[in-house]
Image (cartoon, rainbow, N blue to C red):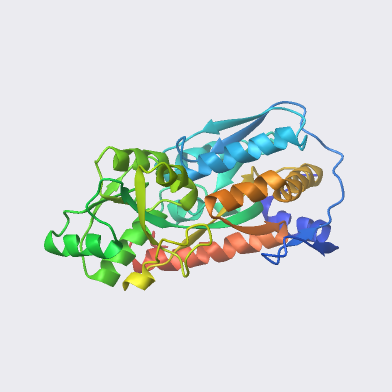
């Protein structure tokens, strides 16, 4: 029996949420009690990452692959493969050719939704099985450690004096970075010079090299560089200060109402069997509960959020509408 994205919600919902027990009390997350699958991978798994090495999605995938192996959640090798380009379009076009192949999984963040909304990808979230959402991540404004800008206010004042002179790096037009840039311009009444890179890792490299003045990565992308004293965090684009970044004020605290968050999840190709999907649901649920994954969340300032099956499909559909509204407001959504 084939397993289409449209049927994922119905079948997975019946399987995944028959019973659940409380876990991770700090987040209120419910852990579904899933039956075991009779199917298992019989050859190496390809874990596709839609961005370049070194960015948040790459760290996310490599952490998960390591946990899968360490805890025997997947008995075959899980090989991380970066397929950057087109703000996810390259990776997801590749995934669309893997229908019926349960040995390929992929990371998914906001670009999974925003790129198709802009008409830059021939496929959308409806063409895949939205396996799981595992966490939510905020954004942080960072500058080079040698930058003269000590606060976001300093940078905004410089931008007012020199329109288009302050360079901000991002992954694509319409990406989360671009949304932050547009919102900051609107909130502060300034004009920034937005420069596009292949991914978060490349934007960080440009920032370190002095080729841009500001970047808005996820905390996981910037944590090590900030800790090493190579980057300086000047603002959190979150509603409140993050527990792991208590000394970094929010943009709101500095007078600029700019907030944004994104999910991190995993998708599967279409046309898998129910049992194949159930196997991967079990992997996600078990991985989510490991100490290593909890540490990954804590170290990188992510908030735990587990959704599988019907809940995952519903969450992604809602996020799609959220980003569609934002990109339509920015004038960069594809006209239907």
Q: Position of residue 225 (x, y in %)?
A: 41, 42
Q: Residue at x 68, y 58 (%)?
A: 307
Q: Is residue 128 visible?
A: no
* Residue at the spot 59% in from the left edge and 54% down from the top edge: 126
Q: How many marks?
A: 0
Residue found 73% across the figure and 26% down from its top: 43
x%, y% of residue 172? Answer: 36, 48
Q: Quadrant of the C terminus?
A: bottom left
Eyeballing the image, is 285 above or below 51? below
* Quadrant assignment, res 335: bottom left
**Quadrant holding the N terminus:** top right
Residue 312: x %, y % from top left: 66, 58
Image quarter of residue 238: bottom left
Residue 201 in sight in this render: yes
Of residues 18 and 271, the one nearer the viewer is 18
Q: Is residue 210 left or right of residue 199?
A: left
> How far from the left and from the top, in percent, is residue 257?
36, 72
**In-front residue for pair 109/207:** 207
User: Outermost residue, left direction?
Assistant: 161
* Residue located at (31% from left, 40% from top): 208
21 relative position to 247: left or right = right
């Amino acid at each position: 029996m084939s397993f289409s994205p449209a049927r994922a919600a119905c079948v997975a919902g019946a399987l995944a949420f028959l019973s659940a027990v409380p876990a991770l009390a700090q987040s209120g997350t419910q852990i579904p009690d899933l039956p075991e699958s009779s199917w298992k991978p019989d050859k190496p798994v390809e874990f596709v990452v839609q961005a370049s090495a070194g960015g948040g999605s790459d760290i996310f995938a490599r952490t998960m692959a390591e946990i899968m192996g360490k805890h025997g959640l997947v008995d075959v090798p899980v090989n991380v493969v970066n397929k950057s380009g087109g703000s996810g379009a390259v990776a997801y076009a590749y995934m669309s050719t893997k229908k019926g192949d349960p040995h390929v999984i992929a990371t998914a963040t906001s670009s999974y939704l925003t790129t198709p909304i802009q008409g830059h990808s021939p496929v959308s979230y409806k063409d895949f099985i939205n396996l799981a959402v595992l966490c939510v991540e905020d954004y942080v404004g960072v500058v080079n450690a040698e930058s003269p800008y000590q606060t976001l206010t300093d940078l905004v004042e410089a931008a007012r004096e020199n329109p288009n002179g302050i360079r901000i790096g991002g992954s694509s037009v319409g990406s989360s970075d671009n949304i932050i840039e547009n919102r900051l311009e609107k909130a502060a009444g300034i004009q920034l010079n937005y420069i596009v890179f292949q991914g978060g890792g490349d934007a960080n490299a440009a920032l370190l090299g002095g080729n841009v003045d500001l970047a808005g990565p996820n905390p996981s992308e910037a944590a090590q560089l900030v800790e090493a004293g190579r980057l300086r965090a000047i603002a959190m684009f979150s509603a409140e200060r993050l527990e792991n970044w208590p000394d970094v004020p929010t943009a709101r605290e500095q007078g600029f109402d700019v907030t944004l968050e994104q999910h991190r999840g995993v998708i599967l190709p279409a046309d898998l069997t129910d049992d194949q999907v159930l196997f991967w649901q079990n992997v996600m649920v078990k991985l989510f509960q490991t100490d290593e994954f909890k540490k990954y969340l804590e170290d990188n300032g992510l908030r735990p959020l587990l959704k599988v099956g019907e809940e995952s499909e519903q969450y992604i559909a809602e996020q799609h509408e959220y980003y569609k509204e934002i990109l339509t407001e920015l004038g960069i959504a594809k006209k239907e």
